[in-house]
Image (cartoon, rainbow, N blue to C red):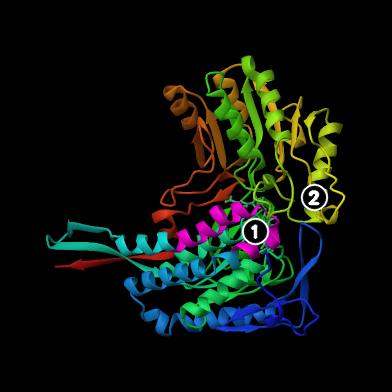
Amino acid sequence: MTYPFSLPSSPSADAPPLLRNYIGGEFVASDAHFENRSPVTGDLLALVSEAGTTEVNQAVAAARAALTGPWGQFDVQQRAALLVKIADGIERRFEEFVAAEVADTGRPIHQARTLDIARGVANFRTFAQLISTASSEIFESRAADGSDQFSYVVRKPLGVVGIISPWNLPMLLLTWKVAPALAMGNCVVVKPSEETPSSATLLAEVMHEAGVPRGVFNLVHGFGPGSAGEALTRHKDVAAITFTGESRTGSAIMKAVADDVKEISFELGGKNAAVVFADADFEAAVEGVRRSSFTNAGQVCLCSERVYVERPIFERFVAALKQKTEAMKIGFPDDANVDMGPVISRGHRDKVLSYYRLAVDEGATVVTGGGTPQFGDERDGGAYVEPTILTGLPDSARCVTEEIFGPVCHIAPFDAEDEVVRRVNDSAYGLAACVWTTSLARAHRVSRQMHTGLVWVNTWFSRDLRTPFGGTKLSGLGREGGRHSLDFYSELSTICIKL
Ligand code: NAD
């Protein structure tokens, strides 16, 4: 599998490719650049142009100008047709997107094909359909003077929307916001994570090929504080910021946008629980928890890092999960049988390993894992950690309360339904929970009581893109998905007509 950016975008035959910003319909390099390295081997993949305040100002100005250009005249059908064209464009270059995502993240290639890039396509198709069928609200009433009146609601674009995304599901999470933002007629300036610039750069190429008018989609590469991310959040002409990432970054962005009272939508961190009742389908629950703890090396905001198992099946469950975990194949992403790749970077690996050490200091039993795998080849230069199961920690331990964002879960026993609901809810986070039971009444009763934006019963990660998505407490602010995205990415305006 070859990285999609090669010599054509390189300054010289020997130099690594240079990924550029995309501003006002043109690819532009900046004076500064940073490195994009493979988490599989540590090798240099590309240099990336780093946008600063100058480039962000140019991108926002281009976006602002485009709002009043031809794009501003596009009706719903034209916007829907353009979204479909973008989806077609991604599909045409599907394998290049897969290669970009695999190179940046080291994830198994089958995951990039079936989840990341497939969902990128689905995001554009879904919102094309949703705007084509969306209706408006109309109210008939009688005014004080007895005359009839009717009020109806129109949607207008917000203006320039800043989209800031993380590295864990780069294409999926970026397009989840770009598609509805464009669907509602906005112009966007996107800043992908500095760890994963490649699929966003390809997306800019697809936008160009699809004929998206200049300035409607702009891409700036860079970091957060003191770099492109912060410049975007503080720009006066940006009407809204939609952000996915860590909770403390959300808090910093909230402060940055406060003076201008920008619209915000935040999808933030999690410390999600899975609850396994003794009446659950045992095999399904073990496999479900393996998936929910270790998919994408545990780097999904929805992963289960806290697992509560009803006491009668606790020992058996831990043993079965250990066996399944130790059977997982860790390795090169392009191996069709691989279950898990590296974490995103050496820096993140160090953070995850520091939690593995902390768990032992806090008194945990390490059931399996707890270190780094040794391969004896170039992967030893990468960012691999072992999938890890812990037991024996109190609920107050830092490893049970703080988001680790790696392939790790802590399993604790519980005795009663109300007890486990209380323990699950006793968290600063509130993104998602899983409930494993064969009792329909219990499934509903327990799910209703979870203080989370999402509850899965006997499954994990299954999503209907029309449903609201988001978290409570430190896990986020607002909901996106389906009509909730249409609401966030538009300004509702009520018109009242006296008849
Ligand atoms: P991060 O917060 O470090 O970075 C996310 C993005 O924000 C990056 O593009 C980064 O450059 C930018 N950024 C950082 N500081 C900024 C600042 N002060 N101003 C503006 N931009 C800034 O997050 P990450 O490490 O890339 O991603 C992992 C986190 O994302 C985890 O906490 C995970 O739970 C969360 N996440 C949440 C969801 C969700 O839907 N709730 C989905 C995926 C990931």
Can the viewer see residue 397 in this picture? yes
Ligand 1 placement by image quarter: bottom right
Q: In the image shown, does 230 or 197 lie closer to the viewer? A: 197
Q: Residue 166 got which mark?
A: 1
In the rendered structure, which disc, 2 or 1, sits on the residue that comes first in sequence? 1
Q: Quadrant of the C terminus?
A: bottom left
Tag 2 residue? 349
Can you give x and y, in whole percent of width and height, for residue 69 in the image?
43, 85
| Some atom of ligand 1 lies within 8 Å of the CB belonging to the residue at label 1 | yes
Quarter holding residue 72 = bottom left
Q: The residue tagged with tag 1: helix, strand or loop?
A: loop
Measured along the vertical axis of the image, is residue 260 above or below residue 373? below
Distance Cα–Cα, label 2 vs label 1? 16 Å
Q: The residue tagged with tag 2: helix, strand or loop?
A: helix
Quarter holding residue 288 = top right
Can you give x and y, in whole percent of width and height, for residue 173 in the image?
56, 58
Residue depicted at x 53% and y 43% = 461
Q: Residues within 10 Å of mark 1 (few under 14, many from 20)?
A: some
- Which residue lies most toward the top here? 312
Residue depicted at x 24% and y 62% = 151
Residue depicted at x 63% and y 23% = 309
Q: Which residues are magenta?
A: 98-124
Q: Residue 199 got which mark?
A: none
